[in-house]
Image: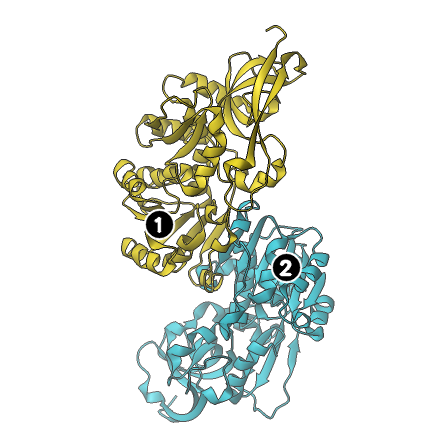
Chain colours: A yellow, B cyan
Amino acid sequence: MSLKVLKSRAIRLKTVPKGVPQVQDFEFFDENVEEKGLKENELLVELQQVSVDPYIRGRLPQYHNKVLESLGIAKVLASKDAKFKENDIITGTFPWRTYSIVNGAVANAQTKDLITKHKNEFPLAYWLGILGMTGMTAYYGLLDVGKCQENEKVFVSGAAGAVGIVVGQLAKKIKKCYVVGSAGGDAKCKYLKEDLAFDNAIDYQKFNNNAKQFQEELKKMFPNGIDVYFDNTGGFVTESVWDLLNKNARVVICGQISIYNNRDNVPKIDDFLFKLIYKHIRVEGFVVSDFKNYPEFYGNMIQWIQKGSLSSKETILNGFGKIPQGFIDLFSGVNTGKMVIDCTKKEKEEESKNDA
Amino acid sequence: MSLKVLKSRAIRLKTVPKGVPQVQDFEFFDENVEEKGLKENELLVELQQVSVDPYIRGRLPQYHNKVLESLGIAKVLASKDAKFKENDIITGTFPWRTYSIVNGAVANAQTKDLITKHKNEFPLAYWLGILGMTGMTAYYGLLDVGKCQENEKVFVSGAAGAVGIVVGQLAKKIKKCYVVGSAGGDAKCKYLKEDLAFDNAIDYQKFNNNAKQFQEELKKMFPNGIDVYFDNTGGFVTESVWDLLNKNARVVICGQISIYNNRDNVPKIDDFLFKLIYKHIRVEGFVVSDFKNYPEFYGNMIQWIQKGSLSSKETILNGFGKIPQGFIDLFSGVNTGKMVIDCTKKEKEEESKNDA
């Protein structure tokens, strides 16, 4: 590839938000990316798809006046890293720039071959969702941290989110568990029950933060208690669960999205530690990077998707310019499944909800 | 043994206390125990020593107007259970009666032979403390639940209590850990450091429930953070610990004595579940009955005591009449080590603190 200058759009954080982020907190600007500047181990990449995830909220302060970054999929335009070559489609952590020069170390060499191998079978967005970070989070969280066993009774909060849909399906389809999920709104609850075969779903928005009423409803759905609680949200939903946990229950703390913009939503659980004693309850937090057994994850998950045991769902917004909006929408629960921004499309193109 | 009537003293709960139990809540009365009434599998026993423990506080409501019971040591006067014979010294759950007829199932056949074998070596109270329920609680809690590894940094609350002294010694002497304990008053802290070789001790009474100040002091003692927190107390001590926990820390919830009489002392930890995520912290409650590997426990503990690696301590009150007071004293921390009432002694006899 010959020397050239690429015009790139980029997004930096102008204001560190106090509560819910607003589009005005993000600023678009133009840059020139000079391909001649490629040093040893560097790649010139064109952004294809961007994953926005709730954990980014906590990291915003470190991006003040800097270009943001997140997981995504990029196309290699030029490479000085022996592991990657022109036209490779790669996953990794990329800046929110249409074109970037990055160190090859930010990209995942393992998924590159998997993406190529399954390119006619799996939409690209799968590698950000069910076969990406959120799928891994669900897999390790439910199986390794939660030690979910066959036929257990499982409750998932944030069940229609990117992690939740995989947790629920793994529990239901692979572990044959009784599975109930909480989600916001009728449409999501219907999706969980009808499309993903959850045994039941509960619309948390109907309860106006009333933990006691939510608990009464949940109790009807779990007459024999809860063995595994997979928590993506925290808040009053988590408050409600504590007294329904069974002997030897496991509480998997994956996310607490309800507090990321508002610390007032921290669960207020009476005697929350005392209640762990007589039931021998384990509460454990984790992040996906604590786990490394990738061959097992890809081997199992690809096979289960191929067999039809697991299905994927993404909410895809079109156009690089939609990245901030997509991120903000996570906190009002606009997405069902994985929220992805497709930068290869124009913003005006019709947006699709990609169901598998 | 011929038919006879034994005059027995007994203690029932007259009033279910609201806060800290008072001696007036307990009532002494006389009963006749008729030995001829012994049925199949029953034993006539004479109470020797009584173990009083904080967990009894939570069970008081079920003893309203009934004779209380707890772990203890008794002498068999007559037996219709093939596992036990006259003059056996047995451990078990016995009513607070000087003489009782009990089902042999309440007694522990396993310890009977151990008590006989080591009778010239270990004081009887050991079988209620370091070699009894509290020693087992410490052993399984630290090693099985806490998965304490060599050279870790361990903090124990309630460190001068029956469980705490064993937890600290196991961590220090067996696992070569850096160990700090909290306890009430200078004398207990001095005991932990000088007699039990704790690396440091902190007097929680000096902090007047101020979690922030306690945390500052604790931080100086743990410049490299805490790997295992063994919690016997809850309250502001537990509040203080949360932010000092290391990556992969384990919080073992064994007791929450600070709330047993006053629910206002429940720890108020900001974002307490969120904080588990990025450090992959595990919080787990347990009771000793969750574990059953007794041969391992007795084998290891007896050997470690014989080698001098572990020492015991009991606070022994003399006389059956002291049982209620001994129990009440647990909540003001009168005891160092295991609180035991020796019913074979008269109340007027000089009381001893039995150091090994």
Which amino acid does the dot numbered 2 rest on? Phe
Q: For the residues carrying marks 1 and 2, which lies nearer the camera in this image?
A: 1
Q: Where does label 2 land, which residue?
A: B155
Q: Where does label 1 land, which residue?
A: A205
A332 relative to B205 in the view: left or right: left
**Disc 2 packing (10 Å; few <14; some 14–19; many ≥20):** many
B225 relative to B11 in the view: left or right: right
Q: Is residue B7 visible?
A: no
Q: Is disc 1 placed on a helix, strand or loop?
A: helix
State the image coordinates of residue A165 (x, y, percent, origin top left).
37, 38
In the image, what residue occupies the spot 35% across and 91% down? B3
B167 relative to A170 in the view: left or right: right
A40 relative to A72 in the view: left or right: right
> Which of the image's four quarters has the N terminus of chain B?
bottom left
State the image coordinates of residue B13 (x, y, percent, origin top left).
42, 85
Respond whether the residues carrying marks 1 and 2 are from the same subunit: no
Which amino acid does the dot numbered 1 rest on? Gln
The span from disc 1 to disc 2 (Cα, nearest Å) is 42 Å
Q: Chain of mark 1?
A: A
Is residue A132 depicted above or below A261 in this figure?
above
In the image, what residue occupies the spot 54% across and 68% down? B134
Q: Chain of mark 2?
A: B
Q: Is disc 2 placed on a helix, strand or loop?
A: strand
Asked if the residue at tag 2 contacts the one at tag 1, i.e. Cβ–Cβ closer than 8 Å, the answer is no
